Amino acid sequence: MKRSVLLGLFVTASMMASTSFADGKPADLCDANIQTINNAKGQLAAKPELNQRAETSVSKAQALKAQGKIDDCIAETSQTIVELRKATGGSNN
C-alpha cells in the first residue's frame, strides 16, 4: 500500500513538473515534438502507414503552430509520438 501511494505521488509530481517546465517555452515543446517525429520517420521506412501518419501529423502541427495554436500543436504531436512508440514497440524518440 505504501509503495502504491509513493508511486502515485511520484507520478503526480513528475507530471506537474513536466508541465511547469513546458509553461515557459511551449513553442519549443511543439518544435521538439515535431523534430522527434521527423527523427522517427527514418525508422518507419518499412511501415508506410506509420510514415504517412507521421507526415500528416507534422503537417497539421506546423499549420497549428503557424495559427498560434501551440497547445493544439503539442497535443497533436504528443499523441503521434505515443502512437509511434506503441506501434514500433520502442521507448525512445
Image (cartoon, helix red, strand yellow):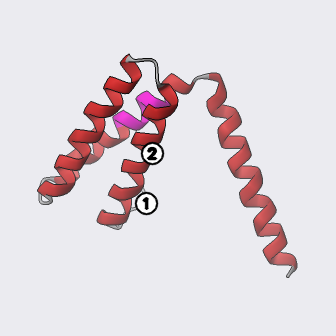
In magenta stretch: residue 69: no
Furthest toward the right, the residue is 2
Residue at (75% x, 55% y) in the render:
12
**Residue located at (77% from left, 51% from top):** 13
Comparing 10 with 63, the one in front is 63
Tell me how many marks there are: 2
Q: Secondary structure at mark 1?
A: loop
Query: Against 6, is 67 above or below?
Result: above
Residue at the disc numbered 1: 91
Q: Residue 68 appears in which quarter of the rendering?
A: top left
Q: Residue at x 40, y 41 (%)?
A: 77
Could you say where residue 56 lies in the image, as x and y percent from the top left?
23, 40
Instruction: Decide: few, some or many residues near mark 1? Use Cα within 10 Å; few <14, some 14-19, many ≥20.
Output: few
Q: Earlier in the sequence, mark 2 or mark 1?
A: 2
Span shown in magenta: 29-35
As drawn, the label of residue 78 is 2
Q: CA distance from mark 2 to mark 1?
A: 13 Å
- Depth check, front residue: 23 or 10: 23
